[in-house]
Amino acid sequence: MLTYVIRRVLISIPTIIFISIVVFGLQLLLPGDPALALAGEERDPQVIAELRRMYHLDEPIWRQYLIWIGKVLQGDLGESIRLKVSVGELVAAKLPVTIELAAMAMLIAILIGVPAGIVSAVRKETLIDYGANAIGLAGLSIPNFWLGIMMILLFSVHLGWLPASGFVRPSESLSQNLATLIMPAFVLGTGIAAIFMRHTRSAMLAVLRSDYVRTARAKGLREPRVVYRHALRNAIIPVVTLGAIQFGELMGGAVLTEQIFSIPGFGKLVVDAVFNRDYAVVQGVVLCTGTGFIFLNLCADLIYFLVNPRMRG
Amino acid sequence: MRRRGAMVGLIVVVIFLVLAIFAPWIAPYDPIATNFLKVRKPPSIDHWMGTDEIGRDVMSRLIFGARASLQAGVISVLIAVALGVPLGLLSGYAKGWVDSLMMRIVDALLACPFLILAIAMAAFLGPSLTNAMIAIGLTTMPIFIRLVRGQVLAVTVEDYVEAARALGNPHLRIAVRHVLPNIVAPVLVQSTLTIAAAIIAESALSFLGLGQQPPAPSWGSMLNVARQFIGQAPWMSWWPGLAIVAVVLAFNLLGDGLRDALDPKES
C-alpha cells in the first residue's frame, strides 16, 4: 500500500514541473520586447533597464526559468506591478472567496446531478429519462455567463428577491453572505450538475446490468434496496473521483461568474490582472490552479484507494 | 431518438452556417451603423430584435456575429487537430520515454483549467479574435493528443498491423496507411463536441473583452455590453445568449449522434 502511495506522489512531481514550464513559457508569447511590455505606459529607459535587470531578461531563457522557479519554490510568486503587493498575498486574500463559491456550487451540482442520474438510469427510456437527458444537454450548452445575466434579470430586476451583485463576508453577516452567493453558486453549479447527471446515469446503467445486482434481485430484495444498497454504492465511486476532475471546470467558470456578479475572488483577480497587464499575477493564478488540480486529483486517487477494498489487494 | 436529435443538430448548424456565409445579403441593416434616434428600442416591425445602446440593429449584429463564433469554433479545433493528431500518433507509436514525456506534458496542460489557460494565453498574446482562436486551439490540443495516442495503442496490437510490420513496412507508412484511418471516426466525434466547447470559450473570451474587438460584432461581446443595460433593455441580452445556446446545443447533439453512429461500443 505504501509503495502505491509513494509511486502516486512521485508521478505528480514531473507534471507539476511541466505546469511550471507552461506557466513560465506564457511570457514567451508576449509580442516584442518583454521589458517594454512589462513597463506598460512607462517609457523611461532607466525604468526599462531596471526591469530588464530585475527579471534577468538578458540571461538565456533556461537560466531565467531556473531563477524564477527557484523563487517560486521559496514561496515568492513575484509582485503585482499594479498593486505593489506580492502575488502570494493577493492569491491568499482572494482564494477563500472563490473556495466558498466553488464549494456551494459543487454542493448544488451534486444535489441536482446525482439524484437526476439515478432516476434516469432506473427509469431508463421513459419520459423521465428523456426529460432528464434533455435538461442535462441544455445544462452543458448554456454558457454560465448568460445564465447569470438571465437570473439577474429574473430574480433581481423583475422580482427583486436577491441582490444583483456584490459580496458580503460571512463574518459580517451570514444571511447576507448566502443571499449574495446563492445565485452565482447555482449558475456555476448547473453545468457541473449536467456532467454529474450524465456520468451517474451511465455508471448506474453499467452496475444495474451486473451479476451481483441480478443476484440481489433474484434473492427477492425489494427494488429500492437493490438500487440504493447494491447498485448506487458501486456506481458512486467513479462519480466521486469525477468531482475532483471538475475542479478545473469550476475554476474556469468562477472567472466568468465572479465577473458577472462582481464577486472579489480569484477569477476577478485574474481578469483584472489581464486588463492591467499584470503578468506576474496571471502566471501566479495559473500556477496555483494547475498545482491545486494535481493536488486534488492526488487526494481523490488516494481516497479512492482507501475506500475501495478491491484496490488494496 | 438520438438520430432525430442529431438531424435537428445538423439542420441548426447548417442554418447558422448559411447565416454566417451570406450575412451581408441576409442582414437587414449594417451591423456597425449607429443611429442615435433609435437608441435601445424594443423589438418592433422595423427591428425584429430591437436596437442596442447606440441604435445598431441587434438582428444584423447577431447574424454577423455568427461569423465570429463559427469561425472561432472551427478554426480553433482545426489548430487543435492539426497539432494534436500528429503528436498523438508520435506518442502512441514511439512508446518508451517519448511517450512518457509527452503524457506528462499533456497531464500538465490538462491540469491548468481550460478557460483560465486560454484567458492567460489571450492576455499574453494580446486581445483579438485571431489570438483567441490560437489560445483555444492550443488549450484543446491535449485532448486530441491523448485521444489519438489511446487509439494508436489499441490499434497497433491488432493482427493486421503486426502483419504489416512483419512484411517490413516502414514506420511512417504503417502509421499513415494502417493506423490513421482507424482514428478518423473518434477524432471526428471529438472535433464536433470540441467545436461546441470552443464556441462557448470564444464567447466567454469576447465577453471578457479578450476576443473579437468592437465595433465588430460577436455574441460574447454583445452580451458584455447588454449586461450593463439589463434593466433598461433586456432584449439586448436575450438574443445573443439564445444564439450561443442554439449553436452549442446543435453541435453537442450532432457529436452525440455521430458517436452513436460511428462507434457502436460507446452507445
Image (cartoon, rainbow, N blue to C red):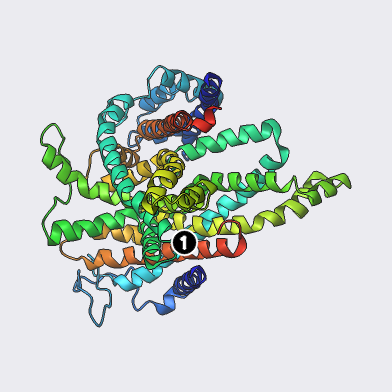
Amino acid, disc 1: Asn
Q: Considering the numbered disc 1 on the image, is that residue within a helix, a strand or a loop?
A: helix
The residue shown at (63%, 32%) is B100
The chain ID associated with circle 1 is B
Residue, far front:
A220
Say which quarter of the image contains residue B186. Answer: bottom right
Q: Is residue A142 above or below residue A94?
A: below
Question: Can I make out residue B122 in this image?
Answer: no
Between A122 and A211, the one nearer to me in the picture: A211
Question: Which quadrant, please, contains the C terminus of chain A?
Answer: top right
Indicate the position of residue A269 as horizontal and vertical percent values.
Answer: 29, 37
Give the residue number, with chain letter if any, for mark 1: B252
Dot 1: within a 10 Å radius of its alpha carbon, few (fewer than 14), some, or many (20 or more) residues?
many
Between A178 and B138, the one nearer to me in the picture: A178
Residue, far bottom:
B45
Q: Is residue B243 left or right of residue A1?
A: left
Indicate the position of residue A214 as horizontal and vertical percent values.
Answer: 51, 51
Indicate the position of residue B1 as horizontal and vertical percent values.
Answer: 48, 70
Question: Can I make out residue B36 in this image?
Answer: yes
Q: Is residue B146 left or right of residue B222?
A: right
Q: Is residue B129 above or below residue B42?
A: above
